[in-house]
Image (cartoon, grey):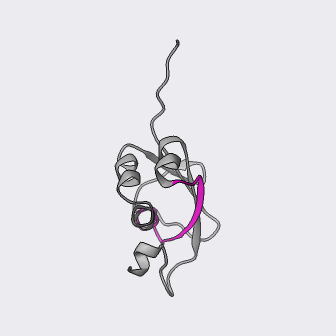
Amino acid sequence: MSDMERGRDPGGPGLVTVRLFAAAREAAGTGTDKLPGRTVGEVLGFARARYGRGFTDVLATCRVWVNGEPAALEDAVGPGDEVAVLPPVSGGAG
């Protein structure tokens, strides 16, 4: 198993808090984690490797925010930042 599959990047960036909601939380099996990465895309790459195909499929429909603001994959992140993965919300009156 590679370091990326283990969610580790020896000598790499510090850890970023990742918060997962709704279907992303269910697919990952956790609501929060600490993952390495210098950009949002790197952090999500570690998340895909750690949580597998089900999470990857859900992630394709999600919005990603950093510290409460919409984020792009190339946005820089570092220790102390929070990446939130928010699937679309469905609902209705019943």
Q: Residue at x 60, y 57 (%)?
A: 32
In the image shown, does 44 or 32 lie closer to the viewer?
32
Total count of labels? 0
In the image shown, does 68 or 29 lie closer to the viewer?
29
Relative height, residue 93 to residue 17 (above, below): above
Relative height, residue 79 to residue 74 (above, below): below
Residue 88 in percent (x, y) is at 45, 36
Q: Range of the magenta residues? A: 29-44
Q: Quadrant of the N terminus?
A: bottom left
Residue 46 in percent (x, y) is at 44, 68
Relative height, residue 2 to residue 50 (above, below): below
Residue sitting farthest toward the bottom? 11
Q: Residue at x 52, y 13 (%)?
A: 93
Residue sitting farthest toward the top? 94
Residue sitting farthest toward the right? 80
Q: Is residue 45 left or right of residue 89?
A: left
Residue 54: within the magenta? no
Q: Residue at x 57, y 70 (%)?
A: 78
Residue 83 in percent (x, y) is at 55, 57
Residue 60 in percent (x, y) is at 35, 48
Q: Residue at x 53, y 53 (%)?
A: 29
Q: Is residue 86 left or right of residue 73?
A: right
